[in-house]
Amino acid sequence: MTDLADALRKAVRGEVAFDVTSRALTTMDASNYRRVPLGVVAPHDADDVAAVLEVCRGHMVPVVARGGGTSIAGQATGTGVVLDFTRHMNGLVSLDPDTRTAVVQPGLVLDRLQEAAAPHGLRFGPDPSTHSRCTLGGMIGNNSCGSHSVAWGTTADSVRELDVISARGERLRLGQDWAGAPQGLREVVDGELARLRTGFPELPRRISGYALDALLPENGADVARSFCGSEGTLGIVTEAVVRLVEAPRARALAVLGYGDESAAAEAAAGLLPFGPLTVEGMAADLVPSAHVLPRGGAWLFVETGGESVDEARARAEAIVRAADVVGSTVVTDPGGQRALWRIREDASGTATRMPDVGGTSLLERGRKLGGEAWPGWEDCAVPPQRLGAYLRDFRALLTAHGLRGTPYGHFGDGCIHVRIDFDLLTETGVAAFRRFSEELAEVVVAHGGSLSGEHGDGQARAELLPKMYGHDMVRLFERAKAVWDPDDLLNPGMLVRPAPLDANLRFSVLPREPVDVAFGYPADGGDFSAAVRRCVGVAKCRTTSVTGPAVMCPSFRATGEEEHSTRGRARLLHEMLAGELVTDGWRSTEVRDALDLCLACKGCRSDCPVEVDMATYKAEFLHHHYEGRRRPAAHHSMGRLPQWLRLVARTRTAWLVNALAAVPPLAWVAKRLGGIAPERDIPRLAARTFSRWWERREKAPVGTGGDLVLLWPDTFTEHLSPSVGQAAVRVLEAAGLRVALPPTVRWRTPSGGGEGVTVAMDPVSLLRGRERVCCGLTYVSTGQLERARAVLRRTLDLMEPVLGTAAPVVVLEPSCAAALRSDLPELLHDDPRARRLADRVLTFAEALERLAPDWTPPSLERPVVGQNHCHQHAVLGDAPDRRLREAAGLSGELSGGCCGLAGNFGFEKGHYEVSVACAEEQVLPAVRGAGEGAVVLADGFSCRTQLEQLAGVRGRHLAEVLAEGLEAPGQVG
């Protein structure tokens, strides 16, 4: 391997990586399969590609071309050298609006082409649900289609010419009339004309096998079209000329509700004469919240276009009138359409986690973990008129095998996606997977279908191609492959002479027994391996830009490196558990380095379709990685921040700390010793803590009519921004609520804090004690989980009398509220009090909405800018905040993404540049572009600090803004 790496480094200008991390990141795509490559090369240009092929041919090492790695049949994995086109060969070479063509490199992400074409009223027709991260090269390799194929066809329909380098280094320009055909290909075709004319099923989504029928004279002898769908087995694409189509000026989306998926499938073909742009189908099983859809148990998403909104709407309404539906809606608002399409696009991930119908233990779930479902029969296609009948047979086969799966997909083209709850962890389960696959292939063929209708055969289906085509046609495929690639250098084991469909399964290398971990992982049966398995490689985290409130994955967008994506980190954790590539387990430096730039923003917890929670996995890893070892200085300085700040408060030395921090040499020493980025300013401590203000303020008589709420004095509000707490008290009391702070002494009761315990909540007396509640956030984020447990158990002891009352707990800092709601019950999963406390945590807006529904906030009538806190987006939700802002006359949307400071992350040495890049993505431009009089909202202390240090802007908590609008704002603070 060393000789190969050295030879490649001498031959190519691009990066050559044979290290553990680079190989681990490319062991898998979005399929069930795993192969360990020797190395990865990111070529600069076609010359580099030719050089790689020459070196690898000399070493008899296979080559696999890879784009976004979203293939779901295993064709983007291999045991030789992987060519990564996303780093350098990712450009749009040219775009000609007059000829409606574009010249693209293989690593270009589809959305980038769409963005460039849009100003000209054009677009690329095919649009898979992975459009934000899939590449044109991958689309050509798999002949991808997408939801608009009923109007604009497959990728093969959109390809004009291809620049290809053959396995033996020949540079070919593929096109019609045999242009670019390798020597010998025409002779193979001319000898098999009858077979080619009769051996391929007629249907819009026939992707399986080689498209040799495109070489027939009546089809224009189109070598480029024939090359599409060859899955990197015939040659390497270095450039492509693609056709663009005119985009409708306006669109409407008709969502049609049916009683079940069979009724929707039966109806789909009948809508095609109306000329829709899409006819997509999905059932209720895949819809997280069906209230946004019309009545029904299954839906068709039918898009229409027109020169105007009225024309598009009229076409959609005509379809509604012609359709026999139980409910319908027509949406012309682009934002509303995007929200509905997100439901459909996320289905590939959502389908991976099905509602659990079994027990909670591994044995009870038969090693399936109940809710896990997998690709493998992801996109069979049949003639659209046969879809209803096929689905009935498909459902019957699932039932016969005791399996579950929810079909969805391109109903108008007869192409069905489905993920099935195969047991791929045991020999018995894998054998059942094989039997089902063989039987389903026969069902598909019986309906005149194709084993693949979009994503290619790969390893998942190629073994079964004889069932579809017969052995003679498969031998013809082998002959064509031999003409293009006589040495079998390119992606061997795919399409011809394939590996068995039950070999190389990625689950086989994982530990058979649960790993000893600190968190409870309740959604994964307590099994860390199952949690890591959540990542199926859909790669939504690799999206290079986000719109709306989305967050995931800021570190990938800042760096562009797979290693710093949620998927990349999950892959490294998978390899850590496997122990083949990453051999030092929890001590792995490769995993540590990949997790280092994880902001723990928790964006993946909500934005990832399968809800990967990398923040929790990071805390788990750090806990084990540093167990019994010296920790980084930042873990002590910032991980134990509550301890240091309480010490300052007890000694009343905040003034001294602030004075010392203002002296540059002393601040430099403190930052160096504490592992703090030298570019950062140390935040000033409040001269008086929030709790001291609370004790000494002149309180109005407490009424008896309002509900009692406990206001949580989180570390940031207590020591760094007490004005937020003061404002919240004022607003809550103005809304008629009674406010108290949590106990500071541990009160034991005979009942152990159970129901029925009554506690007097005198606001002053509750503060007289020696201990403070704490959510443990800083300990969790730095992986100090034993310390976090101790802090949280102490907190539960303090809160035990409160848990026996009905008093809710209002938490002002979003990250602390998220920690109490999610981290607390998962870390102390053996303590029932943890769940009881988590269930009563409310945000500031939630408290006002639930407990003071009749209260009217002050009318402010001002625009707002700022950023929704990433933990609020991921864990808490912001709907009550939106409604509260609207009621107060605060207009405008807050940006998504992450501010980049993210607690301790942005303060740690080595993180400053990434932290700034994250902030520059959305929040800083939004604030800089704010109009005069706009309110800058930032509920999180980190967000406010980032705004202050990078933009010189003071962000405010919503409570502060509302308090200022009350009649006597001078009383606040």
Image (cartoon, grey):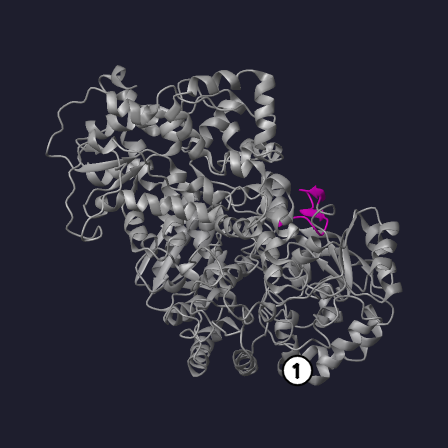
Magenta stretch containing residue 103, yes or no?
A: yes
Residue 522 in the figure: left or right of residue 516: left
- Dot 1 corresponds to which residue? 466
| Count of all numbered marks drawn on residues in the image | 1
In the image shown, does 629 or 382 lie closer to the viewer? 629
In the image shown, does 118 or 236 lie closer to the viewer? 236
Residue displayed at 27% across by 46% down: 840
Query: Residue 200, how many percent across, how many down?
Result: 65, 77
Mark 1: secondary structure: helix
Decide: is 142 above or below 774: below
Can residue 166 be seen in the rendering of this structure?
A: yes
Residue 700 placement: quadrant: top left
Magenta stretch containing residue 335, yes or no?
A: no
Residue displayed at 41% across by 39% down: 815
Report crowding for label 1: few under 14, some 14 to 19, many 20 or more residues within 10 A (C-alpha).
some
**Residue type of the residue flagged with mark 1:** Pro
